[in-house]
């Protein structure tokens, strides 16, 4: 990281959700534009940094913290949530249990951060069409119940990965700049589109 990059405003994003829903794959897809079918075991907390530029030409350094879903790492996750500015709350559309666990993860996050905290609900693995156990509507209903945004994604093909991340980063930047300025909520700042075309894996620059 250059000296200039070190001085950029920093925000922490963390992933939450059951084991194997695709949290680590999501961070790798977004920060490195790659994907592996091999299972990646998360041994506690690790993070990756990505510099993003918004449409207003301001750049931000975003730290993506990875967490394991296992109960034994819960205390580590709590410390990370405390430092987080936003959360990616993830389930696997082929695993109903991971969807049912969303309410518990959400409660954990609200207990620590309160209700007015940027959270993006993400249903992953939509490429596994034949194995789907959770409908799009169920995901949408849960998101509207909590008043949060929602995307269905595929880390494997890069579908909506950029959109879900951009959406959350917009909320985080907006919330924090409003807090600093003491202003009420304005319109969301948009991510600079020219760097962010990743509907397909081959196009992903994220
Ligand atoms: P984590 O425990 O939540 O961090 O999950 P991982 O990122 O380690 O992913 C668990 C498994 O799901 C790995 O074998 C990944 O390759 C696989 N996986 C992750 N995302 C996707 C996806 O979008 N589609 C498919 N088919 N598999 C995925
Ligand atoms: Mg992991």
Image (cartoon, helix red, strand yellow):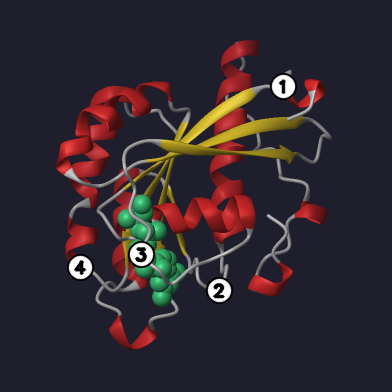
Q: Which residue is drawn at the image coordinates 63% and 60% (left, top)? A: 33
Nearest to N terminus: mark 1 or mark 2: 1
Where is residue 70 shown, x and y percent of the image?
A: 20, 46
Q: Nearer the viewer, mark 2 or mark 4?
A: 2
Instruction: Say which mark, if any, is on residue 96.
Output: 4
Assign a secondary structure to mark 3. loop
Q: How many marks?
A: 4
Residue nearest the observer in this picture, 43 or 64: 43
One can see residue 125 in this view? no
Rounded to the nearest angstrom, the CA distance separating label 3 from label 2 is 16 Å
Where is residue 105 shown, x and y percent of the image?
A: 24, 42
Seen as rendered, the residue at the extreme bottom is 130
| Quadrant including the N terminus | top right
Q: Which residue is mark 3?
A: 39
Rounded to the nearest angstrom, the CA distance separating label 1 from label 2 is 31 Å
Assess disc 3: are there few (<14), some (14-19) or many (≥20) residues with their C-alpha within 10 Å of its C-alpha: few
Residue nearest the observer in this picture, 144 or 71: 71
Assign a secondary structure to mark 4. helix
Q: Nearer the viewer, mark 3 or mark 2?
A: 3
Give the vertical position of 16 relative to 199 (above or below).
Answer: above
Q: Nearer the viewer, mark 1 or mark 2?
A: 1
Give the vertical position of 153 relative to 166 (above or below).
Answer: below
Assign a secondary structure to mark 1. helix
Q: Which residue is mark 2?
A: 157
Q: Which residue is drawn at the image coordinates 57% and 27% (left, top)? A: 11
Circles 3 and 1: CB atoms closer than 8 Å:
no
Q: Which residue is mark 1?
A: 6
Nearest to N terminus: mark 4 or mark 3: 3
- Does the beta carbon at disc 2 come under 8 Å from ligand 1? yes
Rounded to the nearest angstrom, the CA distance separating label 4 from label 3 is 20 Å
Rounded to the nearest angstrom, the CA distance separating label 3 from label 1 is 32 Å
């Amino acid at each position: 990281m250059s000296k200039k990059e070190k001085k950029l405003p920093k925000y922490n994003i963390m992933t939450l959700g059951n084991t194997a829903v695709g949290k680590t794959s999501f961070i790798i897809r977004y920060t490195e534009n790659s994907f592996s079918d091999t299972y990646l075991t998360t041994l506690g907390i690790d993070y990756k940094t990505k510099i993003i530029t918004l449409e207003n030409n301001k750049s931000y350094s975003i730290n993506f913290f990875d967490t394991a879903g296992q109960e034994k790492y819960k205390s580590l996750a709590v410390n990370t949530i405390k430092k987080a500015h936003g959360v990616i709350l993830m389930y696997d559309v082929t695993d109903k249990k991971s969807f049912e666990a969303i309410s518990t993860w959400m409660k954990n996050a609200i207990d620590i951060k309160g209700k007015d905290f940027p959270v993006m609900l993400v249903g992953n693995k939509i490429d596994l069409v034949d194995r789907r156990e959770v409908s799009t509507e169920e995901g949408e209903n849960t998101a509207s119940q909590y008043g949060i945004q929602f995307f269905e994604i595929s880390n494997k093909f890069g579908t909506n990965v950029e959109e879900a991340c951009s959406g959350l980063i917009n909320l985080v930047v907006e919330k924090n700049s409003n807090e600093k300025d003491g202003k009420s909520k304005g319109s969301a700042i948009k991510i600079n589109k020219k760097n962010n075309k990743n509907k397909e894996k081959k196009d992903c620059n994220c």
